[in-house]
Image: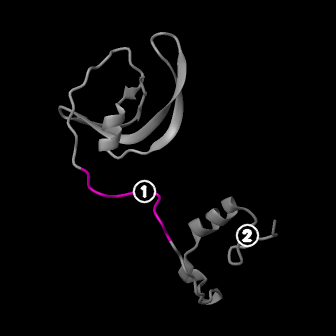
Amino acid sequence: MPKHKSSISKASSYQDMGAYWDEHDLSDVWEQTEPVDIAIDIQSTRKYYALASVEVDVLADSGAVHLCISEHIRLQLELEEIDKKEVTLADGTSRSVPYVGPIELRFKNRIGFAGALVPHFT
């Protein structure tokens, strides 16, 4: 690790660097700076596009821990799998199922976001 992390603050840690800039302004040290050419390529990992909302009638189980949706709804909402979750079914068997999201949920005057399990039943 280099002795100093910053040529201007002479800080040896990020904490010291933060403390320096809490007390100083770039105008205090402008003469110590020099122009540089830099190219930044910022790419979002998120996809932004409009989808038609999907209204569905649902059954709510007061003992449910997770939201579950069908593969058909997942396809309509174009949700990608973000994880796998191990679930135990009512018959006691376990299986790994896709976890997708985020899903915006609206009920009366409330709004929330959640992920959902997508169980495949055969």
Secondary structure found at label 2 = loop
Q: Quadrant of residue 2?
A: bottom right
Dot 1 or dot 2: first in sequence order is 2
Secondary structure found at label 1 = loop
Q: What is the three-letter code of the residue carrying label 1?
A: Arg
Of the residues tagged 1 and 2, which is closer to the observer? 1
Residue at which label 2 appears: 5
User: In this picture, is 33 found above or below 25?
Assistant: below
User: Quick one: 41 or 37, which is closer to the camera?
Assistant: 41
> Could you tell me which quadrant the C terminus lies in?
top left
Residue 62, position as x, y percentages in the image: 33, 15
For this orientation, the residue located farthest to the top is 91
For the magenta stretch, what is the residue range?
42-51
Q: Mark 2 packing: few (<14 Cα in 10 Å), some, or many (20+)?
A: some
Describe residue 8's horizontal placement relative to residue 83 as left or right.
right
Tag shown at residue 25: none
Q: What is the three-letter code of the residue carrying label 2?
A: Lys
Residue located 30% across and 58% down the image? 49
Please name the colour scheme applied to the rendered image. one colour
